[in-house]
Amino acid sequence: MRIGIVGAELSKWKPEQQEKAMDIIRALLHNHNSDKDYLVSGHCPKGGVDIWAEDYAKSAGILMNIRYPKYNRWEPDGYKARNIEIAEYSDILHVISPKGVWNGGKWTGQYAGKIGKDVVYWEIP
């Protein structure tokens, strides 16, 4: 299974929210088979959910398929194109964000839903 995990960059998080987000990431990846399952994420250069998920997957020996933006901008050939790749490649997409905060992870979730992917939103109060 290809498990997409995306969400808000580091600057959007309060410290107490960060720990809750990391708990969700650990729970989502904890019981997966390291030989068959993949983390799909976007290696956000601004930190946050993508990096936390990658760090946990690395420590747990879970395979990763990380989609890097070609350029650190929305478009052309930046975050939007990378987010589309994440949505298309993931079997299920988890979007982890502070409650009420718009971010590229939520955009990716909306796109994934439009193309028929399963999307789960995790909003941290």
Image (tube, helix red, strand yellow):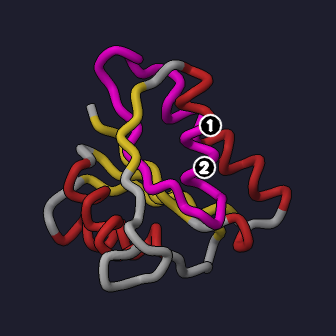
Q: In this view, does 114 lie above or below 102?
A: above
Location of mark 2 (residue): 51
Mark 2: which secondary structure? Answer: helix
Residue at the spot x=31%, y=84% of the render? Answer: 76
Q: Distance between the residues labelled 1 and 2?
A: 6 Å
Q: Of residues 24 and 4, which is closer to you in this image? A: 4
Where in the figure is residue 52, as x and y percent of width and height? 63, 45
- Residue lying furthest left in this view? 115
Residue 83 as seen in the image, left or right of residue 41: left
Q: In this view, does 81 lie above or below 23?
A: below
Q: In this view, does 91 lie above or below 6?
A: above
Q: In this view, does 92 lie above or below 105?
A: above
Where in the figure is residue 74, as x and y percent of width and height? 42, 83
Q: Residues within 10 Å of mark 2 (few under 14, many from 20)?
A: many
Residue 125 as seen in the image, left or right of residue 94: right
Give, as a three-letter code, the residue at label 2: Ile
Numbered range of the magenta stretch: 25-54
Q: Is residue 100 magenta?
A: no
Q: In which quarter of the image is the N terminus?
A: top left
Residue 15 as seen in the image, left or right of residue 4: right
Q: How crowded is mark 1: few (under 14 residues within 10 Å), some or many (20 or more)?
A: few
Residue at the spot x=15%, y=61% of the render? Answer: 116
Give, as a three-letter code, the residue at label 1: Asp
Location of mark 1 (residue): 55
Mark 1: which secondary structure? Answer: helix
